[in-house]
């Protein structure tokens, strides 16, 4: 590696001695702040609205928002400060920052699988996926995420790298199966089912919901697959893959964190009850209150 693993002190992502570095610094600060603000808004809106909390999909959204809020907070350190969140770096976060990022990834995968189940087998879904079972699924991947982090901190660096490689490899397989395979089937199943229903507002809402799921999946793949493929290729090649100064200078990791902003924004745009709750009760926009 051509970058030193030690740091004399904590500074900003790059010395603010050029216009480009100042722009990069401001971009990372704005990105971290945006992640926290948007996800906190969605989180508060769901907590305040009982009808939203009664739907399983919003439980997954709560989980995603919580992990993304933590991702935004950790990005002030891993992306803005002059530190390296690497295996043996003295300024690493002991996989905590990466765990929150991974939890967001697992939450979106679980939510996509949940929606496929709900659309393809609605009657069986209502019997199988009770509120307690949904919460159990969410708890399971949170425990799994921190278990992997604990293992990485307890084992030698070489073993930790292999664990990361295997996790990335399995993650790619699940991404392809769930995000591409299931969503293609979901789209055609929903299109066939909706085509048999008479025109109504409910049918239009269902169609908009399906389109939203597909768009979220596409944005997810654009944001995550380049990073996973990069890590897998570099591990097969035997290189470290960590040649950037820190997270805030690595375009692939920036892209993954951009997904923490785009996903809640897509849900706000595509879900009318959520958007109304945010604008009226969270952001308290006067024009929205008068219209309501």
Image: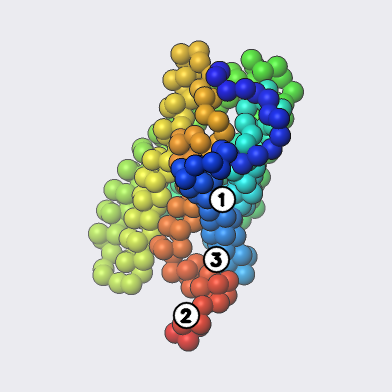
State whether residue 159 appears in this view.
yes
Disc 1 element: helix
9 vs 119: above or below = above
What residue do we see at 48% from left, 25% from top?
231
Task: Kindly report the distance in space between the C-alpha atoms of the residues bearing marks 3 and 1.
Answer: 31 Å
Q: In which quarter of the image is the N terminus?
A: top right
State whether residue 121 appears in this view.
no
What residue do we see at 62% from left, 46% from top?
76
Q: 24 or 128: nearer the eye?
A: 24
Task: Kindly report the distance in space between the C-alpha atoms of the residues bearing marks 2 and 1.
Answer: 29 Å
Chain-order first, disc 2 or disc 1: 1
* Numbered circle sitting on residue 52: 3
Q: In which quarter of the image is residue 291?
A: bottom left
Q: In which quarter of the image is residue 40?
A: bottom right
Q: Name the residue under label 2.
A: 288
Q: 272 or 193: nearer the eye?
A: 272
The answer to whether marks 3 and 1 mark residues whose Cβ atoms lie closer than 8 Å is no
Q: Name the residue under label 1.
A: 29
Tell whether 175 sits left or right of 70: left
Name of the residue lying farthest toward the front = 17
Q: 43 or 54: nearer the eye?
A: 43
Q: Where is residue 41 in the image (x, y as percent from the top left)?
A: 57, 63
* Numbered circle sitting on residue 128: none
Q: Position of residue 164 (x, y in %)?
A: 58, 25
72 vs 289: above or below = above
18 vs 193: above or below = above
Name of the residue lying farthest toward the bottom = 290
| Count of numbered marks | 3
């Amino acid at each position: 590696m051509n970058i030193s693993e030690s740091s004399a002190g904590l500074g900003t992502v790059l010395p603010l001695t050029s216009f480009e570095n100042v722009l990069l610094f401001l971009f990372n600060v704005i990105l971290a702040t945006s992640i926290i603000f948007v996800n906190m808004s969605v989180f508060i809106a769901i907590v305040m609205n009982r009808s939203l909390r009664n739907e399983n999909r919003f439980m997954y959204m709560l989980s995603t928002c919580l992990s993304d809020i933590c991702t935004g907070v950790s990005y002030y350190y891993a992306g803005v400060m002059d530190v390296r969140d690497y295996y043996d770096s003295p300024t690493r976060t002991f996989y905590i920052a990466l765990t929150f990022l991974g939890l967001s990834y697992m939450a979106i995968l679980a939510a996509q699988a949940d929606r496929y189940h709900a659309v393809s087998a609605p009657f069986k879904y209502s019997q199988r996926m009770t509120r307690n079972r949904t919460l159990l699924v969410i708890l399971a991947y949170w425990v799994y995420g921190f278990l992997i982090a604990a293992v990485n901190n307890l084992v030698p660096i070489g073993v930790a790298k292999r664990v990361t490689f295997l996790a990335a490899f399995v993650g790619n397989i699940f991404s392809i199966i769930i995000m591409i395979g299931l969503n293609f089937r979901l789209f055609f199943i929903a299109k066939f089912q909706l085509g048999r229903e008479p025109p109504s507002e409910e049918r239009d809402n269902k169609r908009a919901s399906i389109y939203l799921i597909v768009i979220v999946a596409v944005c997810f793949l654009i944001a995550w697959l380049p990073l996973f493929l990069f890590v897998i290729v570099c591990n097969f090649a035997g290189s470290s893959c960590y040649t950037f100064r820190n997270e805030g200078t690595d375009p692939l990791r920036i892209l993954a964190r951009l997904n923490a902003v785009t996903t809640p924004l897509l849900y706000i745009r595509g879900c009318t009850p959520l958007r109304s709750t945010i604008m009226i009760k969270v952001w308290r926009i006067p024009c929205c209150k008068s219209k309501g």
